[in-house]
Amino acid sequence: MPNNVNKKTALLKKKAYIKASAKYFEKYGYEEANMTKLAKELGVSVGTLYKIFENKENLFFEYILYQIDYFSDILIKKQTDNSIDNLKLYLKYKYKYFTTNKKSIELSLGHEPFFFHKLNKHKQHPMKKIFNFLAIQFKDILKNDEIDYNHIAILFKKVSDGYIESHKMKEFDTTNAIDNTINLFLNGILSANK
């Protein structure tokens, strides 16, 4: 019994450290993050952080998983019966996050495209919940059993990543970014520009 209590306590501590470190990563990003400074901000010893996470890469990956789970929970709570509105909901929160938390996403779309794949030692895809959410929406919209909806979900994510990367390189008016993303994806670039 004490072993189970210790495991639950350790898990709760780990989650608390991940949640508390989110603001730190959003302020400093991955490259500027320092385990010693983070430990000081959290009020724990640096040894404690290393004992729980082993290194900065593992802590950052746990932070990414935390953010994805949080995002997924929002989507599930706020989804409607309208699949297009659910795609817009996904884009709304994604674009808002990426345009307001520039430091925390430096490497996700920047100079190291496989950064998160290298961090993922569990070989589970961190975006699986999000892809499932998107796949359900596309299945409802397209209604074709021949389509691999997970593939469509991944492509949709990549198109929206392109909007973020473009905005990162040169800021532009994002007023219609959500509708433009959906129209571009569903109608294609040629029909969207007619």
Image (cartoon, helix red, strand yellow):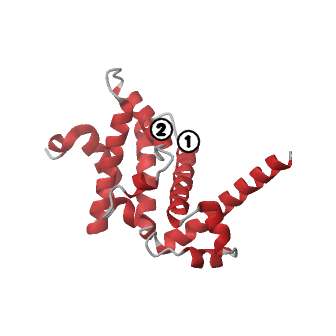
Q: Badge 2 is on which residue? A: 133
Quarter placement of the N terminus: top right
User: Marks 1/2: CA distance?
Assistant: 8 Å
Query: Considering only vertical position in the picture, is 177 above or below 23?
Result: above
Name the quadrant containing residue 78: top right
The residue furthest right is 1
Between discs 1 and 2, the one toward the N terminus: 1
Quarter placement of the C terminus: top left
Q: Position of residue 104 (x, y in %)?
A: 45, 66
* Element on which disc 1 rests: helix
Q: Badge 1 is on which residue? A: 76
* Element on which disc 2 rests: helix
In the image, taking residue 165 as reference, residue 4 lies left or right, namely right
Name the quadrant containing residue 143: top left
Looking at this view, is 23 or 47 the one in front? Answer: 47
In the image, taking residue 158 as reference, residue 14 lies left or right, namely right
Q: Residue at x 52, y 41 (%)?
A: 79
In the image, taking residue 56 as reference, residue 90 lies left or right, namely left
Q: Residues within 10 Å of mark 1 (few under 14, many from 20)?
A: few
Q: Which residue is drawn at 21% across and 40% down?
A: 188
Q: Which amino acid does label 1 sit on?
A: Ile
Q: How crowded is mark 2: few (under 14 residues within 10 Å), some or many (20 or more)?
A: many
Q: Which residue is drawn at 48% across and 43% down?
A: 124
Query: Considering only vertical position in the picture, is 163 above or below 45?
Result: above
Q: Position of residue 181 (x, y in %)?
A: 30, 48
Q: Do the residues labelled 1 and 2 touch (CB within 8 Å)?
A: yes
Q: Position of residue 41 (x, y in %)?
A: 63, 77
Residue 105, which numbered label?
Answer: none
Exactly how many numbered labels are in the figure? 2
Q: Which amino acid does label 2 sit on?
A: Phe
Q: Residue at x 43, y 72 (%)?
A: 31
